[in-house]
Image (tube, helix red, strand yellow):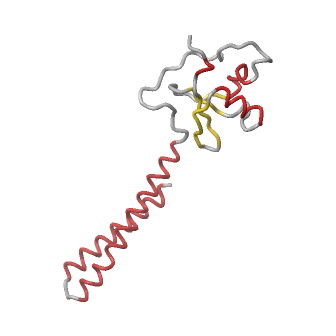
Amino acid sequence: MKSMLRMSYSILQNDETKGPFTIGQLRSMWSSGAITLNTLYCEAGYERWLPMSELLPLLEPSSSPLREPSQPPLQPLPRQAFPEPSAKKKARSAARLLEGIGTLTIVLSIPGCFAGSSFDAPALTGLSACAFVLGLTIFIIGRFRE
């Protein structure tokens, strides 16, 4: 049985992961009111977020005997220390990336449209127009993907 006093913990506040913290740092945050019973925490190497109420015996050791939280053993994570707090952030990032790629394609295609018409090069104008439409399509997909 490993000592919970030496473990590191991450907390989830406002959909943002913060930490890692020691139990001493969590006690200070608990005393100041920065974390509550509903604040979620995750022990380093595990995959589940749990309410801070599970750590209450460690946050207020004088009020109850020191014991491990009443949760079944969790499986260690193979690659990351803490899980992603939200899949929404990944989706937002992907949508912004699509918007950026679409915008860049549009911006880069505009000079070709003007150059093709100025130099009587319909192939350049057509290619630039296709790039413009493609950029606009990518931008719109990114915009509505959020």
Report which quarter residue 121 is drawn in: bottom left
Image location (x, y in percent) of residue 75 = 49, 20
Residue most toward the right?
63
* Front-most of residues 107 and 31: 31
Image quarter hosting the N terminus: top right
* Left or right of 27 in this view: 77: left
**Residue found at x 43% / y 62%:** 99
Q: Residue furthest top?
A: 1
Q: How many marks?
A: 0
- In the image, residue 4 sits, relative to residue 44, either above or below, namely above
Q: Is residue 113 above or below residue 64?
A: below
Residue 97 image position (x, y, % from top left) = 42, 57
Give coordinates of residue 64: x percent, y percent.
77, 15
Q: Residue at x 31, y 80 (%)?
A: 111
Asked which quadrant contains residue 112, the reply is bottom left
Q: Quadrant of residue 69?
A: top right
Vertical order, 67 against 60 (above or below): above
Relative placement, left or right, of 73 versus 13 is left
Residue drawn at point x = 42 percent, y = 30 percent:
79
Which residue is at 20% across, 88% downward? 120
Residue 7 drawn at (x, y percent):
58, 23
